[in-house]
Structure formats: structure tokens, C-alpha cells
Amino acid sequence: MGAGAAASLKFDSLQAALNTNTIAVEKAPDLVAVMGGEPEAMLDKALEALGGIGNFVKKGQKIVIKPNIGWDRTPELAGNTNPKLIGALVRKCLDAGASKVTVFDHTCDDWRKCYASSGIETAVKAAGGIVVPGNDEKYYSKEVALPNAVSLKSVKIHDSLVEADAWINVPVLKNHGGAKLSCAMKNFMGIVWDRRYFHSNDLQQCIADICTWNKKPVLNIVDSYRMMFQNGPQGKSEADVRTAKTLLASTDMVAIDTAALQFFNQVKKLNLEAVGHIGIGQTLKLGTTNLDNITIKRIKI
């Protein structure tokens, strides 16, 4: 740019341009849906649309990634979050400057077998993260109050989450016998010690209640590369699984579960009313079920 051109670029004229909206800044969507790629590529596209991993992970932070690792199942059976997605996300967090990335779940089967069979332990370690057990009460040393909950008024939450600067919730989308749908809100059950209370005191309400914890995930990422559409949450065989190659991402856990349910309905019919915790989540002001009121970006790879 020559001196004359530089001199003609006055601050006042630039300010006027801004005031008249001639320079537009694209707003990040509330929810991103990516279809058709491998887990790592879909994660890249989703984070790019949301402004980058730096919007969620800051330099020096201790980060927890919470997948579903509840079952002694291989990735093909879709009982757990895809290990390629978790490995890629660990690398993203470390590249963003996270000081430590911890991954855990309070599993249903033996945690050692779950971590190994799922492929998640290997993927996390290869990416530079660490895994810690979630099945020992010594990791749940603090009782956390839930003042905005209805039934579940306090709970012990895993110490790594209590001590973390931020966490990312990464469930796999699947059918569930009790909760009907296992997704972002249901994945919170893996952060607490005593889950028996949930099953004997209105499971749907308790799932919504634990989501009122004041340390919300900075991001929810729903893995539906493979989707278990029946016989959940464990599944019996690959006949229960549909390869869907889809990933959803949002800061709104109610909206992402609503969108995931709509996607699930393309394979097997399930009404919103049956998944009571989603509607209760909206009542508790945790997010919205009205997807018409949010901005959704759809990306096809």
C-alpha cells in the first residue's frame, strides 16, 4: 500500500464502516452437525465452525475429557465413545496449551477391561493424555451441593473433575433400556460415585438434576460414528449398530440431546416425551429443546 493510500484510510471512515455494518463478522453457530467423515476429520470441521479449540481450552488449564467407557466392548459394538475421536480431542487440547488432559469414566464393567477393550486407553496415552480409574470411592472425596436440583440435592463427583479448570463431555449416542437414550446429559452419570440413587429415585429427574452442577462442560461432542439403536446400553452384536458417520457439537446439552434424538429417530422411532430428562433439562433452564430458536450449521464431508 502506498503512502497516499495509507493516508486516505482515516480512522473516522473505518469507524463509520463498522457502524453501518459493512464489515460483517460471522457468528459461531449454537450447534454443529458434521456428516460423512472419519472421527478425526469430523472433529476438525466441528471445532473450526465453532471458532477453534482455543475457544474452549486455554493455555495452562487442566482439562478433563469425559467419554462413555462404561462397557467391556470393542469399538465395533458402539457401547463406548469412539477411541479415534477421543485420541484426536486429547491432541487438540494439548496443542491448545492444556497443562494436563485426563480421561476417565465410572464404568459398569471392570474398568481395566473397559479402558482396554474400548481402545480409549491406548488412544489417550498415544496422544499424550492420562487415564485414571473412576471405580474407586477414594477418587470421590468431596460432596458437591446441587442447589438447583429437584431430587438429587448433593452428590460425590470425581476429584479430577472437581479440580479441573474445564471439561469436555463426549458421549456416544445409543439406545438405553432405562433412560431410553444415552447422550450428553446421560453421560453425567459417569462422573458420580453413587448411581444407585438414580435408579431408585426417578432416573429421568436425577439425570437432569446432576446436569445442574455449576461446573458445566465447556463443550459437548456427541459421537455417532457408530450408533447403537437397540439393545442398549451394552448391545448384543453388530446387528444392533448402524454406521452413521455423524458428529454433533454444542455448548447446549439440552439442544444437542434434542438434535441427537431427532437423528436417532431416522433409524428407530423414539419420542421426546419418552426421554424425560431432556424436557426436564429445559424446565431447569439447562438449555432448549426448540431447535428453531438456535443457529445450526450442517457440514457434509
Image (cartoon, grey):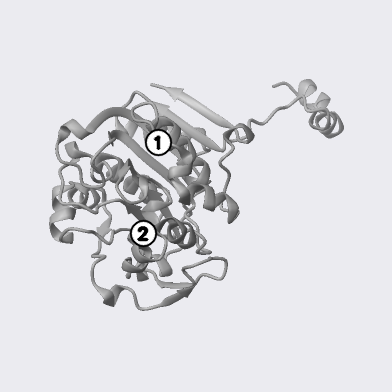
Q: Which mark is residue 205?
A: none
**How far across and down, in percent of the image, does residue 92 sit?**
37, 45
Q: Amino acid at mark 1?
A: Leu
Residue at the (47%, 54%) spot, across then down: 217
Q: Secondary structure at mark 2?
A: helix
- The answer to whether residue 102 shows anywhere in this view is yes
Amino acid type, residue under disc 2 in the picture: Met
**Which residue is located at x 49 percent, y 33 percent?**
32
Residue in the image at 47% along x and 40% along y:
272
Q: Nearer the viewer, mark 2 or mark 1?
A: 1
Mark-to-mark CA distance, 2 and 1? 21 Å
Q: Is residue 7 above or below residue 85?
A: above
Badge 1 marks a residue whose secondary structure is loop
Task: Give neighbour class at mark 1: few <14, some 14-19, many 20+ (Cα, 10 Å).
Answer: some
Classify 202 as above or below 159.
Answer: above
Residue 220's place in the image compared with 7, above or below, is: below
Category of crowding for the residue at label 2, using alpha-carbon neighbours closer than 10 angstroms: few (below 14), some (14–19), many (at least 20) = many
Q: Nearer the viewer, residue 176 or 131?
A: 176
Residue 274 horizontal side relative to residue 294, left or right: left
Q: Give the labeled residue for mark 2.
A: 189
Residue 11 image point, x, y percent: 83, 34
Q: Position of residue 218 (x, y in %)?
A: 49, 52
236 or 183, nearer to the observer: 236
Residue 100 in view of the camera: no
Q: Name the residue rendered at 33%, 74% in the picture.
A: 140
Which mark identifies residue 270? 1
Q: Quadrant of the N terminus?
A: top right
Quadrant for the C terminus in the image: top left
User: Which mark sits nearer the N-terminus, 2 or 1?
Assistant: 2
* Total labels drawn: 2
